[in-house]
Image (tube, grey):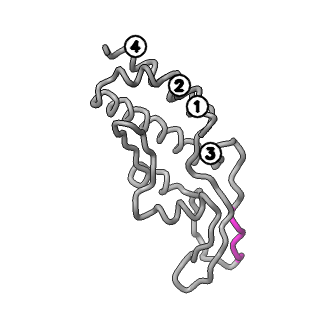
């Protein structure tokens, strides 16, 4: 987190002037916008650094006929499973408890069983959540916009 030290120093004075309720409201707005940018990035199948996700393993030719494959993480990126919350001192984007295990396996490239009868499979690392320069810009612009609108 040393990359964000200058960023933190610049905004520390401004944020200290806000009331706790104002900080919570601002953190909620930041979390919602970050969730939106994370959802768009997952939809594009890209890691935070801009590199594409590693493709799925090819399935056998004699799979079920007529089955339409969805894009990876299509349901995982929905607002139902990807939660955004703002607290007094933090803005959090996380997956809900029932899909956290799946997200963690893909985020770090861990082993997991795809189904009950299958053997363990090592999944390639596909970073679902991450922070990049565009996200930093989103946070900065939201904070500046908030201070332009709201009186201290």
Residue at 43%, 18% (x, y): give it: 145
Image coordinates of residue 2 in percent, x first then y, are: 62, 37
- Magenta part mainly helix, strand or loop? loop
Specify the quadrant that holds the N terminus.
Answer: top right
User: Separation of disc 2 and disc 1 at Cα?
Assistant: 6 Å
**Mark 2 crowd level (few <14, some 14–19, many ≥20, 10 Å Cα):** few
Element type where label 1 sits in the image: helix
Residue at 45%, 55% (x, y): give it: 95
Element type where label 4 sits in the image: helix
User: Separation of disc 1 and disc 3 at Cα?
Assistant: 30 Å
Residue assigned mark 2: 9
Residue assigned mark 4: 148
Question: Comparing marks 3 and 4, which lies closer to the viewer?
Answer: 4
Q: Earlier in the sequence, mark 2 or mark 4?
A: 2
Residue assigned mark 1: 5
Range covered by the magenta-colored residues: 56-61
Image coordinates of residue 51 in percent, x first then y, are: 72, 46
Q: Are marks 2 and 1 in contact (CB under 8 Å)?
A: yes
Residue assigned mark 3: 44
Q: Earlier in the sequence, mark 3 or mark 4?
A: 3
């Amino acid at each position: 987190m040393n990359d964000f030290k200058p960023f933190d120093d610049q905004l520390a004075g401004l944020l200290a002037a806000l009331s706790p309720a104002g900080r919570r409201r601002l953190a909620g707005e930041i979390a919602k916008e970050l969730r939106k940018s994370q959802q768009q990035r997952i939809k594009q199948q890209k890691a935070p650094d801009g590199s594409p996700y590693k493709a799925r393993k090819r399935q056998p030719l004699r799979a079920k006929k007529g089955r339409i494959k969805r894009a990876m993480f299509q349901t995982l990126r929905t607002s139902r499973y990807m939660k955004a919350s703002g607290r007094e001192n933090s803005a959090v984007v996380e997956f809900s408890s029932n899909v956290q295990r799946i997200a963690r396996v893909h985020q770090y490239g861990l082993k997991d069983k795809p189904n009950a009868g299958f053997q363990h499979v090592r999944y390639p690392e596909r970073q679902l959540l991450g922070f990049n320069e565009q996200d930093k810009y989103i946070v900065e612009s939201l904070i500046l916009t908030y201070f332009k609108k709201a009186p201290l």
